Image: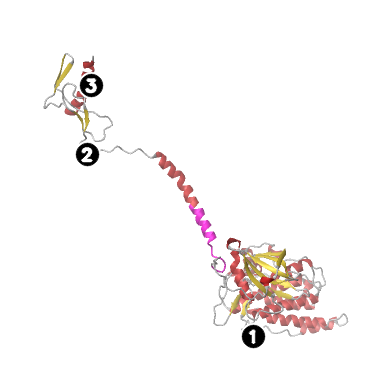
């Protein structure tokens, strides 16, 4: 039985060899062994010669020749590599993760660009030395206690604080608005900036470190707050209106003016405010106006470039037509005329809350609020101011009051669509002073004669330094 099994093995191998060789000559069985004779030479060793077989087999001749199997591939023959298995799992992972990876990279890129975006005035390094602070006499030795937030704005919040026995205003800028703090500090530190109608500057300080850094600007405090806040809760008499308007124009005229060297200080250059509005006009206890918030202001020093003069800065509602249109002439006079357009709007706010006219006084409204609401878009203002050339409306009862009628005429010349036709701040100051003086002599007995004289008065000409 054992010989038969071995014979069967030999027969299977021989069958395979007959396929390879082409023939098998004969096979005989003698007892328990078998002998096979194949034409040609006798092969008594079982040697497999394929390089990478899936099934090993060999060809040999003789009894039990396949007991010992040897694998000796023919290195000289062609190498047949099996096809690699298809990486189905890898392809599936790549197809699944590639969109997620690309989306993550895009989000990271957007986040990086947002964090490294250019601020309105250029790059600001938080580790950069902001330079020497202006003189702060004994501030480091005086206790300063923040009491309450009085206002919030684009560049920070304003606190009422107590320093010794005096109240002061502390404007706190977050770290991302460092450039605005630095610009306002530099403007207040300009020689010749001490004026009764400009906000009195006390000190500027850097508080904290790294991401907790804050920049403080300390100025005098005015309990009445801004002109906007005052108009919301109060109506004006004719005398109050004239006083506020005249002192406001006086402060802006001084800001716009080139002042020669005086009182041991260097000459003061002309400065354009670039964010003039009722919210940036403070009121003293006697209703005298003081101008503040010089974070966007720009100086025009002879022989020096004005620095960063980006076009569309400020508050949209108070932007002049040329600013809304993006057609600014980047020259000194052009920037001063932009301020004068905003002066016209603030004067309109004052007139709208004056009780001198023979008619009801409406609730306080911002310029263009009646036409386009409280939160207009830039496109709304471009369409209204630039294309339609509309301005806030005058009520008929205002024009029936002699003083208000003259003031409305001055307002129209301030917000003229043609920038070169606008009045200067100095001219507005003179006109308001003239109107106030003439109105002050009005009595109930000579009202008609006063109206006639005021109507025929020659107002100061429009020529100015602009």
Percent x, y of residue 71: 22, 32
> What quarter of the picture does the C terminus occupy?
bottom right
Q: Is residue 324 visible?
A: no
Alpha-carbon neighbours of circle 2 within 10 Å: few (<14), some, or many (≥20)?
few
The x, y position of residue 111, in whole percent, is 53, 56
Judge by depth and name the residue closer to the eye, 270 or 36.
Answer: 36
Q: Find residue 78 and name its label.
A: 2
Mark closer to the observer (1, 2): 1
| Residue reaching furthest to the right | 445
**Marks 2, 3: nearer the viewer:** 3
Decide: few, some or many residues near mark 1? Use Cα within 10 Å; few <14, some 14-19, many ≥20: few
Q: Are marks 1 and 2 in contact (CB under 8 Å)?
A: no
**Residue 191: x, y in percent?**
63, 80
The image quadrant of residue 322 is: bottom right
Label 3 or label 1, whichever comes before in sequence order:
3
Name the residue tied to disc 1: 264
SS assignment for the magenta stretch, majority: helix
Which span of residues is magenta-colored? 105-122
**Contact, CB < 8 Å: mark 3 with mark 1?**
no
Is residue 43 toward the left or the right of residue 436 in the image? left
Residue at image point 17% right, 17% down: 33
Camera-side residue: 358 or 33? 33
Judging depth in this view, the residue of 188 and 216 nearest the camera is 216
Please give the residue where the numbered disc 3 appears in the rendered image: 9
Element on which disc 3 rests: helix
Q: Point out the image quarter for the N terminus.
A: top left
Whether the magenta-drawn stretch holds residue 354 is answered as: no
């Amino acid at each position: 039985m054992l010989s038969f099994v071995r014979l069967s093995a030999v027969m299977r191998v021989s069958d395979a060899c007959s396929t390879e060789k082409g023939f098998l000559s004969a096979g005989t069985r003698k007892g328990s062994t078998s002998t096979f004779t194949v034409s040609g030479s006798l092969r008594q060793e079982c040697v497999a010669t394929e390089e990478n077989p899936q099934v090993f087999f060999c060809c040999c001749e003789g009894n039990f020749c396949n007991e010992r199997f040897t694998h000796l591939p023919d290195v000289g023959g062609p190498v047949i590599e099996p096809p690699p298995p298809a990486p189905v799992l890898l392809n599936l992972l790549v197809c699944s993760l590639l969109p997620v990876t690309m989306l993550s990279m895009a989000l990271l890129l957007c986040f990086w660009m947002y964090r490294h975006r250019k601020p309105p005035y250029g790059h600001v390094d938080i580790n950069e030395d902001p330079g020497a602070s202006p003189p702060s006499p004994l501030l480091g030795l005086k206790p300063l206690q923040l009491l309450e937030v009085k206002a919030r704005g684009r560049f920070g919040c304003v606190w009422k604080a107590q320093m010794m026995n005096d109240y002061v205003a502390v404007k706190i800028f977050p770290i991302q608005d460092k450039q605005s703090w630095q610009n306002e500090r530099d403007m207040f530190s300009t020689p010749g900036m001490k004026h009764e109608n400009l906000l009195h500057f006390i000190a500027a300080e850097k508080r904290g470190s790294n991401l907790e850094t804050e920049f403080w600007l300390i100025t005098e405090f005015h309990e009445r707050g801004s002109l906007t806040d005052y108009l919301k809760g109060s109506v004006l008499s004719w005398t109050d209106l004239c006083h506020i308007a005249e002192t406001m124009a006086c402060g802006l005229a001084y800001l716009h003016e080139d002042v020669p060297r005086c009182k041991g200080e260097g000459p003061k250059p002309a400065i354009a405010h670039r964010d003039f509005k009722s919210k940036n006009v403070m009121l003293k206890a006697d209703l005298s106006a003081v101008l503040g918030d010089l974070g966007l202001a720009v100086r025009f020093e002879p022989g020096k470039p004005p620095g960063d003069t980006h076009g569309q800065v400020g508050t949209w509602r108070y932007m002049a037509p040329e600013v809304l249109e993006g057609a600014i002439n980047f020259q000194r006079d052009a920037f001063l005329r932009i301020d004068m357009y905003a002066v016209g709007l603030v004067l309109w706010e004052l007139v709208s809350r004056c009780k001198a006219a023979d008619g009801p006084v409406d609730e306080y409204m911002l310029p263009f609020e009646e036409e386009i609401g409280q939160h207009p878009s830039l496109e709304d203002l471009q369409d209204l101011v630039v294309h339609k050339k509309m301005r806030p409306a005058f009520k008929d009862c205002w024009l029936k009051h002699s003083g208000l009628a003259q003031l409305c005429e001055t307002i129209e010349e301030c917000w003229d669509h043609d920038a070169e036709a606008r009045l200067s701040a100095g001219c507005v100051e003179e006109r308001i002073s003239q109107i106030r003086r003439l109105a002050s002599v009005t009595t109930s007995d000579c009202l008609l004669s006063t109206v006639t004289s005021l109507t025929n008065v020659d107002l100061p000409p429009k020529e100015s330094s602009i």
